[in-house]
Image (spheres, rainbow, N blue to C red):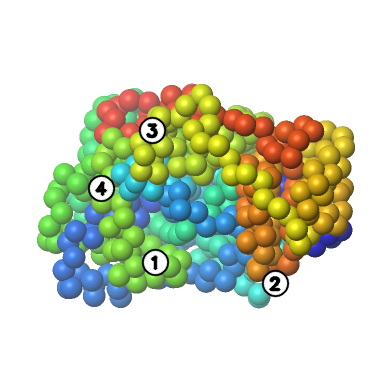
Amino acid sequence: MAGSHKAGATSRRESGGSAAPQRRNKRSRARIAGVAALSVVVLAVAGGGWIYFQLNGNIKTFDDGGVSANRPAASDKGSNVLVIGSDTRSGDNAQYGHGKGDVGRSDTAFLMHVYADQKHAVAVSIPRDSLIDIPPCKLPNGTWTKDKHDVMFNSAFEVGETVQGNPACTQNTVEKLTGLRVDHTVVVDFAGFAKMTEAVGGVQVCVPNDVYTGDLNPNLHRKGTLIFSKGPQTVSGQKALDYVRIRHGIGDGSDIGRIQRQQAFVGSLIKKVKGNGLDPTSLLPLATAATKSMTVDSGLGSANKLISFAMSMKDIDLHNTKFVTLPWRYEGARVAVVKPEADALFAALRADRTVDGQDAGGKGEKAAPSPSASAPAPASGQGISVAVYNGTVEKGLAGKAAESLKSAGFTVTGATTAATQDYTHTVIEYGPNDEAKAKTLATHFPGALMRQAKTPGLNVILGTQYKDGGSAAAPSAPASVPPSVSDKARSADDNICSNLSYG
């Protein structure tokens, strides 16, 4: 791999990227995702065989052959589930969407991190308009696209322009953005969502002010009739969809402005499901609606697998189910990811730290101002070859790291500048059979991210956290969620009328 490293596989940007113009679809959209997946969590306790066979016939899977081989390594620090909301108009969805179209699109997505203690979970909402990089993705004809730069996040789901969308492409994009390995991906359509809200007997929500049909559809060019009165109320079916998609007339009127209302809705639904009880009679209609609305990866492609997954989350209570939003700021009509805070958030999740700073790996300790344990002693690199790349703007960093590695016995095949210089974390890339060598190399770069590549060999791309003049990363405190994120976190048991909109 020396001399042929393509940093575009792991870096955040490459030179030559441009912001491509994006279509704004004016059709009404289902702005909620993951409700079905979260509801399935409670189905495990029902456990009856008659439910098992009912569910098994409903489950659809997508082709996960499009999941990139160049992805973050698996981790024992919790698990990650990507939930995508699809607004396809195919089948039953046409009656709810008020629109037409043959291309599956997504306007809502969140990554749920289930901690290793299986008692905490956090869902990170990713704004649809976020400007990010999309790595190579598989097309229906079997070919792969090239990297795309500074494009809207939701465009990843449209790659290939199929009715079912491209869940694998969105998964690849999230893994590149976060450095977290996505263990499972779930796609939810809004027809199933509407039926599911009916199955539970409606969901309690809160509306901060009166809302009219003109708010729901600005093309009316008039106020219209009242559809939501200010205050708490119960909604289901079409009205539930209307609630989660409204943006005009509430908050700042933006797509991102409604994220907190969607988070409040999901929390309220979880509360309603648990409040209804976990008996098979009440859960079967919900289970049927949920599984009929979902398309999942092959790892969840049977009732048995779904129930096993659900069992892993059954002990998470409402207060320990948190919702946060990817750190963002407006950039014109789009949304830019605020990098320092976003990097810190995902580093905390990789370390299995909860929103309030707990170590959820089983020890329950708080993040301390200094490392809780010393890093492993640097190991001998005898017989291991590695190429070194400088992913920062600091001159000479690759040469310094190369000399340090040589003194430790490594054979350095090259030391040069990476294709981009915006790395925060040091990244170690390793081939299919090189994981053991990569772990040896990692002892010289504490805190480095590990990523498997398609081709053999070892690369290390240095980030800004690499210590200047030394072979080790600068010691730092245990990762923690930045206050700008944690202070705005929502719990599933929060008051439904609090914090309902940005702006």
According to the picture, the residue beneath numbered tag 3 turns out to be 365
Q: Nearer the viewer, mark 1 or mark 4?
A: 4
Q: Amino acid at mark 1?
A: Leu
Is 133 on the left or on the right of 375, as rendered?
Answer: right
- Examine the rendering and report whether any part of residue 159 can be seen: no
- Examine the rendering and report whether any part of residue 313 can be seen: yes
Specify the quadrant of the image occupied by residue 433.
bottom right
What residue is drawn where x is 57% and y is 57%? 73
The disc at residue 353 is none
Cα separation between marks 3 and 4 = 20 Å
The residue lying toward the viewer, choosing from 390 and 107, is 390
The disc at residue 315 is 4
Q: Residues within 10 Å of mark 1 (few under 14, many from 20)?
A: many
Question: What secondary structure is found at the residue carrying circle 2?
Answer: loop
According to the picture, the residue beneath numbered tag 2 turns out to be 143
- x and y percent of residue 32 in the render? 40, 47
Q: Amino acid at mark 4?
A: Asp
Q: Amino acid at mark 3?
A: Glu
Cα separation between marks 1 and 4 = 20 Å
Specify the quadrant of the image occupied by residue 426.
top right
Cα separation between marks 2 and 1 = 26 Å
